[in-house]
Image (spheres, rainbow, N blue to C red):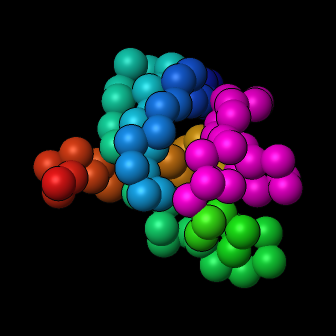
Amino acid sequence: MTELVVVTHASYVSGHRLRLRFSDGAEKLVDFSRWLSGRVFGPLRDVEYFKGFFLSGGTVCWPNGADVAPETLRQADDQSETAA
């Protein structure tokens, strides 16, 4: 059985980007901009609110209940090479 990979560490970088470390040892820079629409994710467009993230249940969450599944984050493109 394959073990679910979870987020073990997250740090704010800039804009809507977080550097994430996963339980399988991978680390990547993820731009959350693609997910910032709709009723739940819309408030995260405010960078100050976005910065209020925390880890819970192995993924990145916000006080309004928004979260992104850890497997989605693990599969997201690494933005490290495109970071300015």
Query: Residue 79 at x, y = what percent?
Result: 27, 52
Q: What stretch is highlighted in magenta?
A: 47-67
Q: Is residue 50 magenta?
A: yes
Q: Is residue 42 above or below residue 64?
A: below
Residue 76 in sight in this render? no
Q: What is the count of numbered marks?
A: 0
Pick the quarter of the image with the C terminus: bottom left
Please tell me which residue is depicted at 39% across the width and 42% down the height of the picture.
13
Quarter of the rendering containing residue 37: bottom right
Position of residue 5 measured from the top left corner of the image (x, y, whole percent): 55, 30
Up the image or down, 3 lies above or below 70; here it is above
34 relative position to 2: left or right: left
Residue lying at the far bottom of the rendered structure: 38
Q: In which quarter of the image is the N terminus?
A: top right
The extreme front residue here reads 48
Q: In this view, does 10 lie to the left or right of 82?
A: right
- Residue depicted at x 35% and y 27%: 26
Q: Considering depth in this image, is 15 or 29 the residue closer to the camera?
A: 15
Please identify the residue farthest to the right as the structure is shown. Answer: 64
30 drawn magenta: no
How far across and down, in percent of the image, does residue 76 sit? 41, 54
* Residue 64 visible in the current orientation: yes
Task: Give above or below for 82 relative to 80.
Answer: below
The residue at the point 69 percent across, 34 percent down is 54
Q: Whole-percent x and y of residue 71?
A: 56, 45
Eyeballing the image, is 74 above or below 72?
above
Question: Of residues 10 and 25, which is closer to you in this image?
Answer: 10
